[in-house]
Amino acid sequence: MQSSTSDHGGFEAELAATDRPLRDFALWLGILGPPVLWLTQFEIIYSLVLPVCVAHSRIVLLVVSIAFGAAIVGCGVLGWNGRSPVAGSPPRIKFVRHFMAVLSLMSMSLFLLVVLAQVLAAAMHSPCPI
């Protein structure tokens, strides 16, 4: 007599459809990469305000922000490219991959907009308080 826990009929098909760790990593990187990169960029910009004020040159802030903006775009594109499911995968897996890919594009757009706002603020206002 077979128990219900040893029946792997549907599970094996789902396991084969999700057995792509690099694609899964790309999807998660597309979702979680932009906020982590923005937070890192924000902390670096915050720590560079005093040296930039002393040197009277805002170019460092702009270069750091543009570099992190490019990395955020890279995470979003990487997440979008990880959306393609394995051939013959169940519709649920296809939906989840597509949803995560769209979510990575939305995360990229939101945090790219925040970085752009910080670039505009750094370009228009002096970092020196006085």
Image (cartoon, rainbow, N blue to C red):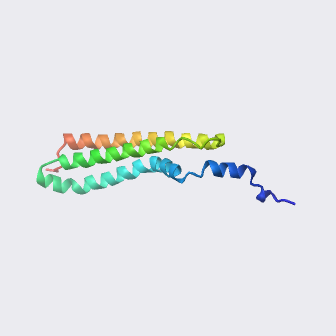
Instruction: Tell me where residue 21 appears, x and y as whole percent.
Output: 54, 53
Q: Residue at x 74, y 54 (%)?
A: 8
Residue that extends furthest to the right in the rendered view of this protein: 1
Residue that extends furthest to the front in the rendered view of this protein: 87
Is 43 situated left or right of 51 in this image?
right
| Quadrant position of the N terminus in the picture | bottom right
Q: Residue at x 37, y 42 (%)?
A: 73
- How many numbered marks appear? 0
4 or 16: nearer the viewer: 16
**Res 106 quadrant in image:** top left
Instruction: Tell me where residue 117 appears, x and y as whole percent.
Output: 30, 40
127 or 64: nearer the viewer: 64
85 or 118: nearer the viewer: 85
Q: Residue at x 52, y 48 (%)?
A: 23
126 or 92: nearer the viewer: 92
Instruction: Tell me where residue 89 appears, x and y as whole percent.
Output: 64, 43
Instruction: Tell me where residue 27 appears, x and y as whole percent.
Output: 50, 47
Whether residue 126 is situated above or below residue 1 in the rendered picture? above
Q: Residue at x 18, y 56 (%)?
A: 50
